[in-house]
Image (tube, rainbow, N blue to C red):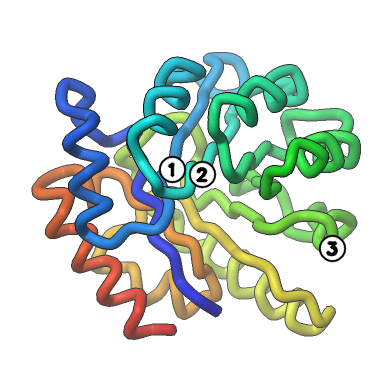
Amino acid sequence: MKNYLSPSILAADFWDLGEQVRAVERGGASYLHVDVMDGVFVPSISFGMPILEALKRKTTLLLDVHLMIMEPERYVETLATLGADLITFHLEATKKPLELIQKIRSLGKKVGIAIKPATPTSALEPFLQLVDMVLIMTVEPGFGGQSLMPECLEKVREFRKRTQEMGIEIDVEVDGGVKEGNLEKVLEAGANVIVAGSAVFGSNPEERTRIFVDKMQMEE
């Protein structure tokens, strides 16, 4: 499968967000990861509608919107209108996952479904034919800069093996603690959409993006 880098703007310098986004564009990123947090599903509060709308006006990158909010069905229509291209919600955050998948699809957007580290991948199986991507968190969601939980890579490996046995080809995104030093292990486990925050935006985003993209292309 083709590999995609999705730099997370949660780690960007917001004083200079426009230039930071342009830098990862020049570096060859395909996606831009936008974490929307509500302070309820996760402890932190991040950014929402105005940031997404501004990004859509200025970038051609696919906007990979990760909803870490309770009852995400309340907001998907607005987010879709403002420019989200791929909307990922947490299975743990909604009582109506099937209806939510159908709603996002009806808005003409790609659909992703995410799980926390404690949630087994078996919980995803009823929805695999209906979504474009699965996001397996490799840290507890809510804060940037955490270290990747090695046991979560085994979840990725088992999930990829299971989908192959089922004859399902699906994008698998990993979010949390991915750095240049563990990137190869993450790809080897079966992930093909890689979220990287501080590892990209910590210094020289264009150069760091190019390093990630080159390594990922070598592993395709």
Looking at the image, can residue 180 be seen?
A: yes
User: Callout 3 environment at 10 Å: few (<14), some (14 to 19), or many (20+)?
Assistant: few
Q: Position of residue 14 (x, y in %)?
A: 23, 24
Q: Nearer the viewer, residue 107 or 44?
A: 107
Quarter holding the C terminus is bottom left
Residue underneath mark 2: 64
Which residue is found at the position 34% from the left and 69% from the top? 183
Which of disc 3 and disc 2 is earlier in sequence? 2
> Disc 2 residue type?
Asp
Kindly report the distance in space between the C-alpha atoms of the residues bearing marks 1 and 2.
Answer: 5 Å
Q: Please give left or right for residue 123 compared with residue 189 in the image.
A: right
Check residue 33 in the rendering and tell me which mark sits there, or answer none: 1
Q: Is residue 181 above or below residue 198?
A: below
CB-based contact (under 8 Å), mark 1 and mark 2 = yes
> Disc 3 residue type?
Gln
Check residue 129 in the rendering and tell me which mark sits there, or answer none: 3
Secondary structure under badge 3?
loop
Which residue is found at the position 59% from the left and 63% from the top? 172
